[in-house]
DNA sequence: ACATTAACAGACAGATCGGTCTATCTGTCC
DNA sequence: GGACAGATAGACCGATCTGTCTGTTAATGT
């Protein structure tokens, strides 16, 4: 059995991710996704039930992928907390260097689907909480005197870096944010 | 002649701003705007020609309003550059304290209308350039040794503050950003 | 060989989208 | 009073939206 081609559910998610990332969620209709994925209309509703459900599935998979990429890039850095912080920013910087970078995928989704009750709000909050945990654990391991405040500051420059890189279409802001974050983490 | 009620053009802009700010641009259709403004369909196309044109008019008016609010809040601060920086952040913090705050209006618009060719991209870029000028002039007046890099850093934390306040639905991030910006501006 | 299942194609429904049009009404200026 | 400009209401257009439905085809397991 040579690799079976990816099933419809997978292909739908792949297509949705590509289109959502490039053009935004509301701007992309079901038909575009179906055509891109080469999947029948009925299959989408069979597997996901609605576009909204597909959207949250897309966000959740993105979060899973981000987490796995991060885990892979910090392999062997258990004793290098600063390296882990740097790795988190490096991943963001790599994303920002890609053509057509549109900034933080989660904040973008929150922009298109406002309201705390929205299912996307939960995914976004979870993503950010995990992100904070990464920073905080590194700071604690570094013996930083004020890990809470510094975690908040690092997330601040992280957010600003992504927003700036999006607006200026340059990786410079997120790289500058990385430098500031490292400085914050190592200062007194 | 007692104040004539605002004309259709004005009412349309008011209604569009209210709805766009709360729900996003793509999420709001023409009909909702017309109903909210109490304006006839033809009047919208008479005055603006298209929804896209209304959107850019909305952005441009927001920018004008922001600028005027800033100018008013720095009246008398010609010799207090630090006060001007603080004023800029205070305005943002006041906005972040309002219920249903959705973050930077311009970045949100850029999210919904990606593409450097989009007419909103120009308005966003202009807004950000003017913002940088405010910071930079204050830093120069302060005699800061590296106004360029510091301007970039202040905009970084400004962006991060707005993004964080949006995501966390709290004014805390933008207030933290204000503190960092002041520190950056006053440090050697 | 046959039943079951999953995916397929595509028609269809109802709503809404942005945008155009006609026709009526209201006020103002001459 | 009569022309005119601007605003009104609302029908209408084609396109597109999400979602449902019918029917067919292909693969699977027993």
Image (spheres, coloured by chain):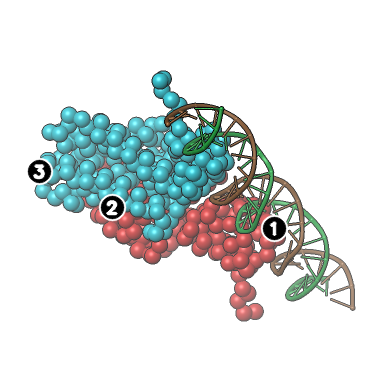
Chain colours: A red, B cyan, C brown, D green
Can residue B107 be seen by looking at this rendering? yes
Q: Disc 1 or 2, which lies upstream in sequence?
A: 1
Q: Foreground: A20 or A149?
A: A20
Measure the C-alpha gap from mark 1 to mark 3: 65 Å
> How many residues crowd around disc 1 within 10 Å: few (fewer than 14), some, or many (20 or more)?
few
Q: Quadrant of residue A82?
A: bottom left
The answer for which chain carries disc 1 is A
Q: Is residue A107 left or right of residue B182?
A: right
The x, y position of residue B13, in whole percent, is 44, 38
Residue at the image position 31 percent from the left and 60 percent from the top: A170
Placement of D24 over or under C13, stated as above or below:
below
Residue at the image position 69 percent from the left and 58 percent from the top: A46
- Tag 2 and tag 3, C-beta contact below 8 Å: no
Residue at the image position 55 percent from the left and 60 percent from the top: A16
The answer for which chain carries disc 3 is B
- Tag 1 and tag 2, C-beta contact below 8 Å: no
Residue under circle 2?
A: A177
Q: Is residue A20 left or right of residue B70?
A: right
Can residue A70 be seen by looking at this rendering? no
- Tag 1 and tag 3, C-beta contact below 8 Å: no
| Front disc: 2 or 3 | 3
Measure the C-alpha gap from mark 1 to mark 2: 43 Å
Q: Secondary structure at mark 3?
A: loop
> How many residues crowd around disc 3 within 10 Å: few (fewer than 14), some, or many (20 or more)?
few
Placement of A19 over or under A127, stated as above or below:
below
Residue under circle 1?
A: A46
Q: Secondary structure at mark 2?
A: helix
Q: Foreground: B38 or B132?
A: B38
Q: Which mark is residue B143?
A: 3
């Amino acid at each position: 059995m040579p690799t079976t081609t990816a099933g419809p559910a997978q292909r739908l998610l792949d297509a949705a991710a590509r289109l959502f990332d490039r053009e935004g969620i509301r701007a992309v209709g079901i038909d575009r996704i179906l055509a891109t994925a080469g999947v029948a209309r009925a299959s989408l509703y069979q597997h996901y039930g609605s576009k909204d459900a597909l959207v949250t599935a897309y966000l959740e998979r993105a979060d899973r992928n981000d987490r796995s990429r991060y885990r892979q890039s910090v392999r062997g850095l258990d004793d290098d907390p600063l390296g882990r912080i740097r790795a988190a920013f490096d991943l963001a910087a790599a994303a920002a260097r890609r053509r057509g970078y549109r900034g933080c995928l989660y904040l973008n989704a929150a922009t298109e689907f406002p309201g705390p009750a929205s299912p996307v709000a939960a995914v976004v909050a979870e993503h950010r909480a995990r992100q904070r945990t990464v920073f905080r654990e590194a700071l604690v391991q570094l013996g930083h005197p004020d890990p809470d405040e510094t975690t908040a500051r690092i997330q601040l420059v992280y957010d600003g870096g992504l927003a700036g890189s999006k607006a200026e279409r340059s990786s410079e802001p997120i790289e500058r944010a990385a430098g500031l974050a490292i400085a914050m983490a190592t200062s007194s």
